[in-house]
Structures are given as C-alpha cells and as structure tokens.
Image (tube, helix red, strand yellow):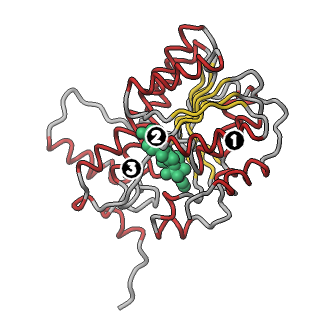
C-alpha cells in the first residue's frame, strides 16, 4: 500500500491552487517523502510557499520535490535526519541558502510501533524518542534561533497525536507525542513576544502507520487521505491564524476540533505538610469523587466502576 510516484503526482494534480496564501514564505516540512508530510509539502507549494522537502529517505524527498517542481512550485530536497542536531541545523541552513529565510516549520517526521509494555524493546523505544521527541526539538530549536535572530515572525506546526492522551500498546509513541504537546505549549509561551506562533496538529489519515495496526485501520477508512489534513496545517502556517498559538488541533478527516489541555483541577487541598495518612484521607473523603476517566478511551478508574457499571440481576 506504499505510495508510488503516480499516486504522489495524482495528489499534486488534485490539490486546488490556494491563491498565494503562503506567497514569499519559506517553509521546512520534515518527513515529507510520503503520506502526511508529502501532502503538507505539496499544499505549501500550491499555496505559493517555497518548501524544503525533508525526509531521511532521500529518494522519496527527491520524488516529492520533483512532483512539486512539475507544477511550477519551488522546492528543494533534503535527506537529512532530524534525529541528529547537526543535520537538523543543516535542514534550516538549506532553507536559508535556497530561499533566503525560514518562515515556517512543520515538524512531521515520526516513527511508531505497537508493543505491550512487557514486550517493548528498549532500542526501538530509544530510536522512536530520538526521532519523535529529539527530532522535533533539534529542528524546532534550529528554526526558532534563526527566526529570533532575524527578527522575523514565523509559524511552527508540530505534528502530535490523539494518542498523547494514552492508548493501549502505544506507551512509548504516546509519550513521545505528549512531549510534543508540552513543547508546543511551552514554546508558544516563550515565543509569543517574538511573533512566532507554535501550534500542534493531531491527524488521523491512511498511512503506513495506520496500515500496521488493525485497530487503527478500523478507525480510519481509506478515504481519510492525508490531503484532508493538509488544509489545517496550511491554515496554521498562514496569516489567517494570526493570534492562534499554543493550541492542539485535531482533524481525523470529517471532524475538526480543539483538544482540551491538562490543567490544575479543583479542589486543591492545602495543609502545611502531607503525610501518608492525610493523603489517604484526602483520597477517601474528597478525591474519590474527582478521579478522572483515563486514556483516549476514557476508561473509568476501577474504584469508580461500581458506580458506573449497570447492576447485575441475580
Ligand atoms: N497517520 C496517522 O493517522 C497519524 C496519526 C497521528 C499522528 N501522526 C503523525 O503524523 C506524522 C506523519 O506520519 P505518517 O502517518 O505520514 O507516517 P509515515 O511513516 O508514512 O511518514 C513518516 C515519514 O517520516 C520520515 N522519517 C522518519 N525518521 C526520520 C528522520 N530521522 N528524519 C527525517 N525523516 C524521517 C519517514 O521516512 C517517513 O517518510 C508522524 O509524526 C506521525 O506520528 C500520524
């Protein structure tokens, strides 16, 4: 089910011209050799932006670049790995060298795999964190430094996931996407005054990440194509989203919504010192009623289940 050149070229033909939304803007899209990243890069170019098409699979990066050039778009390929800080810097340097600026970054490159915690492989976990977390940091920091030094406003779109709320068999992946969410909120706070907006998108689209998982395939029919998510990324890169920062936006094809953010929940109990006994009392007497359903599936905590499960008849 991997995309081929024909499919890639077909997307290019199918994407509507977007009336110069990103004219004169230079944007880096990481992991843009296939599927979501490819769709983001094509949409950026269709909207008039110049795009660095990055993918560790250099041949695929070249393929996307060729497709974009074929319709007259401006693109340059990068086969760098985002998981290496020097190479991440080189991606940003390439954008400056080719297009004279960097106005946007779509941190899309990512890995995923499913494993139950007791079967997880530490090497695979490390590799995933290096791409999904450190890769976003390295490329983001390189882009941010350049934007700040040059005093130019910019827009960073990190690709997170609904899995960041917690999903079975996806602990390491979910944690990496939770880290991306935290980076998004924190960078948005630090960068607002510099005119750099930072938002995240949680997509759902038919890609090899979904093909690998029976559960994901059930939730994601084939018509959920990456190009249905691309307009959201384009909006966040463009001037129409001025004033929007620090947000997590989810789109699964038909549904578009803002994700709720974690917060300090009331009631907040206070006493000079907490010992185990008073913590126990706090839970027995107060917090029992405030425990939260957990994970993306909103599972009721065992303590509360007796109140929520229907009573069995004898
Ligand atoms: N497909 C979905 O439904 C879905 C859901 C939630 C989040 N996401 C996220 O969307 C992003 C794109 O995913 P996709 O589904 O298109 O996956 P994909 O595997 O089709 O594409 C990911 C791309 O990233 C590239 N890549 C991997 N390591 C890299 C590195 N070190 N440097 C540069 N490029 C690298 C890969 O070569 C690949 O082309 C990922 O961050 C993923 O976690 C996808």
Circle 2 residues within 10 Å: few <14, some 14–19, many ≥20:
some
First in sequence: mark 2 vs mark 1 = 1
Whether disc 2's CB lies below 8 Å from ligand 1 is answered yes
* Other residues around mark 1 within 10 Å, as few (<14) / some (14–19) / many (≥20): many
Marks 2 and 3, the one that precedes in the sequence? 2
Mark 1 Cβ and ligand 1 under 8 Å apart: no
Question: Label 3: how many residues lie within 10 Å, few (<14), some (14-19) or many (20+)?
Answer: many
The answer to which of 167 and 103 lies nearer the viewer is 103
Residue wearing tag 1: 42
- Position in image of residue 111 (x %, y %): 42, 48
Circle number at residue 103: none
> Toward the viewer: 274 or 14?
14
Q: CA distance from mark 2 to mark 1?
A: 18 Å
The residue lying at 53 percent from left, 24 percent from top is: 188
Q: Which mark is residue 56?
A: 2
Q: Residue 144: x percent and y percent? A: 51, 19
118 w.r.t. 130: above or below? below
Dot 3 beta carbon under 8 Å from ligand 1: yes
In this picture, is 211 found above or below 87?
A: below
Label 3 belongs to which residue?
173
x then y, percent, for residue 98: 63, 20
- Up-down: is 212 above or below 173? below
Mark closer to the chain start, 3 or 1: 1
Between disc 3 and disc 1, the foreground one is 1
Write down the quadrant of residue 310 in the picture: bottom left
Residue 262 visible to an observer of this rendering: no
Picture mark count: 3
């Amino acid at each position: 089910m991997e995309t081929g050149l024909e499919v890639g070229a077909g997307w290019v033909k199918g994407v509507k011209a977007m009336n110069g939304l990103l004219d004169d803007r230079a944007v880096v899209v990481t992991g843009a050799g296939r599927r979501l990243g490819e769709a983001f890069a094509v949409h950026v170019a269709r909207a008039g932006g110049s795009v660095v098409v990055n993918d560790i699979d250099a041949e695929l990066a070249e393929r996307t670049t060729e497709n974009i050039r074929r319709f007259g778009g401006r693109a340059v390929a990068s086969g760098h790995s985002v998981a290496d800080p020097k190479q991440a810097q080189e991606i940003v340097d390439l954008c400056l060298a080719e297009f004279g600026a960097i106005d946007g970054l779509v941190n899309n490159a990512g890995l995923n795999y499913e494993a139950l915690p007791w079967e997880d492989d530490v090497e695979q976990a490390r590799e995933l964190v290096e791409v999904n977390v450190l890769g976003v940091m390295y490329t983001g920091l390189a882009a941010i430094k350049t934007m700040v030094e040059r005093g130019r406003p910019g827009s960073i779109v990190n690709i997170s996931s609904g899995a960041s709320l917690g999903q079975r068999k996806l602990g390491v992946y979910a944690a990496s996407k939770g880290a991306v969410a935290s980076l998004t909120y924190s960078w948005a706070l630090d960068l607002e005054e510099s005119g750099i907006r930072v938002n995240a998108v949680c997509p759902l689209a038919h890609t090899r990440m979904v093909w690998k998982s029976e559960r994901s395939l059930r939730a994601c029919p084939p018509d959920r194509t990456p190009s249905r998510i691309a307009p959201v990324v384009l909006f966040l890169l463009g001037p129409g989203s001025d004033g929007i920062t620090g947000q997590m936006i989810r789109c699964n094809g038909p549904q578009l919504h803002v994700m709720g953010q974690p917060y300090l929940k009331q009631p907040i109990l206070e006493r000079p010192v907490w010992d185990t006994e008073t913590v126990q009392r706090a839970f027995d007497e107060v917090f029992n009623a405030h425990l939260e359903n957990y994970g993306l599936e909103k599972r009721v905590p065992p303590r509360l289940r007796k109140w929520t499960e229907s009573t069995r008849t004898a």
